[in-house]
Amino acid sequence: MHMPASTAHPASPGAARQVTAAIDKRLDQRLFKALSDSTRLLVLSCLVKCGRPCSASEVAECCEVEFSVVNKHLKMLAAAGVLSAEKRGRTVWYAARCGDLCARLALLIDAIAEWCPNLTSPRGRRFGRPCCSPALRGD
Amino acid sequence: MHMPASTAHPASPGAARQVTAAIDKRLDQRLFKALSDSTRLLVLSCLVKCGRPCSASEVAECCEVEFSVVNKHLKMLAAAGVLSAEKRGRTVWYAARCGDLCARLALLIDAIAEWCPNLTSPRGRRFGRPCCSPALRGD
DNA sequence: GATATACTGGCATGCATATGCCAGCATCAA
DNA sequence: TTGATGCTGGCATATGCATGCCAGTATATC
């Protein structure tokens, strides 16, 4: 993982690491991690479609996944900010924090939009121009 | 405010699996996977900040990561649609497809927005109402 | 053709983590 | 109190995958 630094490349290794540190913060790797597992997507979809807070045992029953597995995924999703968790008595009620989820994904869009200003997505949202010219990209 | 645990769940297991299948397509798990690794984020940031197509060896030197490792990550990012790849002679030129990336993330927003209509993000984008009422969530 | 360059693909290794089981704790009802 | 319920956390196992090495292939140059 260690090679001599080069002057040929526009972005120095140090600069790249700084950029990555920023990306790690702004793109929120934990959110991607949380959404990159199929079981967690199943759990999330269950809660979103349910539309009300559910207990871990309800979700486990709905998803047909072992309780302790679902429980751990629920805690992870809550830690990533995708779910809200509220303990009442001996039961923890989990609910999809759709508002937060949308907002955080919007922040991702904004972060990437800063890289590529003035680009328009197919759905009509405005982002920016491609960061690489068509001639350079070869398209 | 208490949910009887014995009550049948609104979303049946079969329905949940169907929903998940849809989410797997629309939320594009592969994109999350591609963005959930720190080395791949480093590679992506290098290419984004560079602003022009780079060869695998350039990226490897820039990121101080072993060539074959970078090469595999570049292929994975390209397979996820994050990078464009064009072979010219014996060199493959990779470039960040910022436009596509923004567009695909916009699709994610749209997908989630359908779950939670009429919600506004802190940056002023409009998404929807929370899918769970404050009373049910206990806020 | 000979050689150097650039990439590809396979394999082994180590690490992270998803899963499943289970003991234990906290809470509630009788 | 006692028993039942619901969740927590630890452990072992299995799996996926990131990494690194290396042999092989494709291409360009001499």
Image: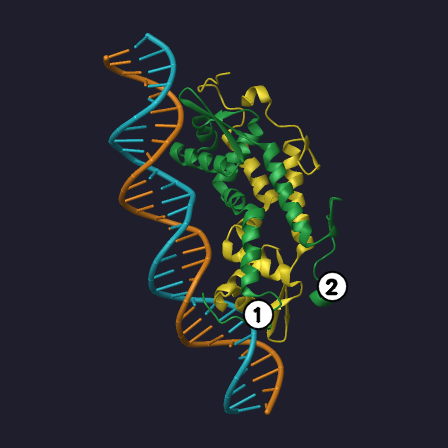
Chain colours: A green, B yellow, C cyan, D orange
Q: Amino acid at mark 1?
A: Glu
Asked which quadrant contains residue A11, the reply is: bottom right
Residue neighbourhood size for the residue with mark 1, other residues' Cα within 10 Å, grouped as few (<14), some (14–19), many (≥20): many
Q: Chain of mark 1?
A: B
| Residue highlighted by disc 2 | A134
Quadrant where the image shows the N terminus of chain A? bottom left
Q: Which mark is residue B83?
A: none
- C23, C18: nearer the viewer: C23
Please tell me whether residue D15 is drawn above or below residue D7 in the rendered image. below
Q: Chain of mark 2?
A: A
Whether residue B75 can be seen here: no
Q: Amino acid at mark 2?
A: Pro
Q: Which mark is residue B58?
A: 1
Asked which quadrant contains residue B42, the reply is: bottom right
- D8, D26: nearer the viewer: D8
Q: Is residue D30 left or right of residue A72?
A: right
Please tell me whether residue A83 is drawn above or below residue B83 in the rendered image. above
Quadrant where the image shows the C terminus of chain A? bottom right
Residue positioned 46% across, 34% down in the render: A74
Residue B3 % position (x, y) = 48, 18
Q: Secondary structure at mark 1?
A: helix
- B62, A41: nearer the viewer: B62
Q: Count numbered badges in the picture.
A: 2
Of circles 1 and 2, the one toward us is 1
Residue A136 % position (x, y) = 71, 67
Inter-mark Cα distance, 1 to 2? 20 Å
Whether residue A86 can be seen here: yes
Callouts 1 and 2 in the same chain: no
